[in-house]
Amino acid sequence: MIKKERHVLVILPHPDDEAFGISGSISMYREMGVPVTYACLTLGEMGRNLGNPPFATRETLPQIRKAELIKACEALGLDDLRMMGFRDKTIEFEDDEKMVQLVTDLIKETNPSLIISFYPGLAVHPDHDASGRAVVRAVRRIEPEKRPTLYTIAFANNTKDVLGEPDIIHDISDTFDKKLAALKAHASQTVWMMKDLEEKLAAGDPEMNSRFRYERFYTYNWENDFE
Ligand SMILES: [Zn+2]
């Protein structure tokens, strides 16, 4: 079961992070009438995949990915998308305090009961880790009894050694079609894998079904803080 929230604030760096990680959960919250704000920090304009034959140039890729992001959010019923305008692959070099302030402002404005981001240090890509770090730092500054819950996404190879099993597992079967629609909306990133994925899912492939029909989170543990 998915817990009803007052407001969910999602902070992730790249268009398509939401589709892979949490799109089933986002649609479930929206179907429950829970407002969801998604702050997407970059437009993924450094994405290496420009297609073969190319569908984009370095110059057109940001516009393409922006349109895909908007389409993905529409598929999820998410109507509060914030495109924050940072440059792809640069989040780790941004000023820490600036990033913390940005997150703090979003929290003050939306007053979320739940925030979803990456687990710093266990999210594989430097932009993912840096986004999670800014979120953890901002939430840590809030008095413990007033802190929103923080769900983190961790998928580094050593995640289970460090954090054990995820404590929150959402069965997203009910909104699985919307997740697929969001993944497809990010065509520049996913077109190469969708056919294979859909075939495997249809054939009941256990690994793919486990990976895509459930969304897993670690509730951030302030007793076990990373710094
Ligand atoms: Zn990403």
Image (tube, rainbow, N blue to C red):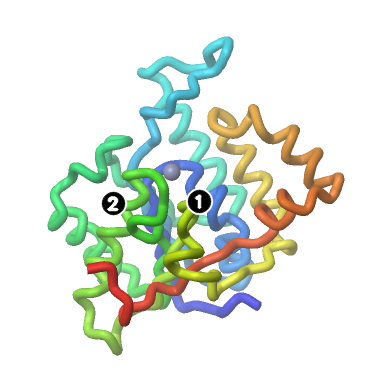
Q: Is residue 54 above or below residue 210?
A: above
Circle 1 — which element? Answer: helix
Give neighbour class at mark 2: few <14, some 14-19, many 20+ (Cα, 10 Å). many
Residue 145 at x, y = what percent? Answer: 29, 89
Classify mark 1 as within 8 Å of ligand 1 or not, answering yes or no.
Answer: no
Residue type at numbered disc 1: Glu
* Residue topped by disc 2: 130
Residue 31 at x, y = what percent? Answer: 63, 67
Q: In which quarter of the image is residue 26?
A: bottom right
Front position in the image: 224 or 58: 224
Residue furthest toward the top? 53
**Which badge, 1 or 2, comes first in the chain's sequence?**
1
Q: Residue at x 51, y 67 (%)?
A: 217
* Residue topped by disc 1: 18
Residue type at numbered disc 2: Ala
Rendering quadrant holding ligand 1? top left
Front position in the image: 137 or 154: 154
Classify mark 2 as within 8 Å of ligand 1 or not, answering yes or no.
Answer: no
Residue 129 at x, y = what percent? Answer: 33, 52
Q: In this view, does 181 lie above or below 115?
A: above
Q: Residue at x 50, y 51 (%)?
A: 18
Q: Residue at x 46, y 32 (%)?
A: 65
Residue furthest toward the right? 203
Q: Quadrant of the C terminus?
A: bottom left
In the displayed structure, does residue 180 sit left or right of residue 63?
Answer: right
Q: Residue at x 68, y 63 (%)?
A: 172
